[in-house]
Image (tube, rainbow, N blue to C red):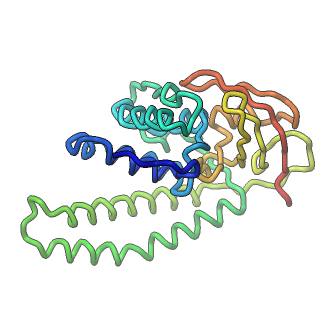
Amino acid sequence: MSNITSPDSTVVEVAADYLISLPPQDREKTQREIYKFTRWLGLHRKADELSPLDIAIYAEQITPPETKPVKSFLTYIRRKGFSKVNLAVHLRVKKTSHKGASPQQNLPAQTTLTAQGYAKLEKELADLKSQRSEVTEEIRRAAADKDFRENAPLAAAREHKAHIEGRIQELEATLKSATIMGENQGTSKIKSGDTVVLYDFSSDKQLHYILVYPREANPTKGRISIASPIGKALLGKERGQTIEVIAPAGTFSYRIEELHHKMP
């Protein structure tokens, strides 16, 4: 039985309630995509804070087969009264003819980073390299179980190692070719590194974003790529202006309420 009453419930709490409400066979097929979605949003994100733009941005991260479970969950969120708008209609995935293309293949060949972003990637690279021996030990322990047919720990450890190695290669290539962005002179126009506060006309809420280069983007922390639809719309604009963002889910309108330039 569903028993959510708190208006301050997080998306994770609402997701747990939603999954419990499903029949066991449906729950098993659905929970992977639901957990992926909630992790992307952030573990402490409140359910009533979700906006159509959040959903449109997430739609850029997934493939068409992944949409159905998330759409059902978004419908549940509205039914429970956490959203006044139907967020499910904004989860529209753009079809592509390049099935094997990875997100990195769509990034510019030349990478530009802020000094802070470069240092962050260096730290991530060092951390991943230090994890190599730990993951190798995990694989050794899991492989001790000779029944490979249903050895979930072994499969998970191998997948983890493959992810680490792939990310290490990506980081090394990025840092090798990256150039560090110089600080621009003072200006009233929005540029990379700036923080903006937007008024969302569709949800009547304020949104806080930091504009960054693609490699530094992390929507769950409000770090939006300047190559994203909203990033492109914001660059060069000023406080008080209204922008329109065209996304697969439709057109969104925002007013730039505040603009804070990155300090030198």
| Residue at the top extreme of this rendering | 250
Q: Position of residue 261 (x, y in %)?
A: 85, 51
Label count reads 0
In-image side of 151 versus 16 (left or right): left
Image quadrant where one finds the C terminus: bottom right
Asked whether 96 or 57 is in front, the reply is: 57
Asked whether 23 or 34 is in front, the reply is: 23
**As displayed, is residue 223 above or below residue 146?**
above
**As displayed, is residue 114 above or below residue 229?**
below
Instruction: Kindly identify the residue that appears in the image at 16 percent across and 72 percent down.
Output: 143
Asked whether 112 or 52 is in front, the reply is: 52
Q: Position of residue 75 (x, y in %)?
A: 45, 32
Q: Position of residue 32 (x, y in %)?
A: 33, 48
Q: Position of residue 50 (x, y in %)?
A: 58, 41
Instruction: Kindly identify the residue that appears in the image at 22 percent across and 66 percent down.
Output: 153
Instruction: Kindly identify the residue that appears in the image at 58 percent across and 60 percent down.
Output: 175
Asked whether 189 or 199 is in front, the reply is: 199
**As displayed, is residue 103 above or below residue 249?**
below
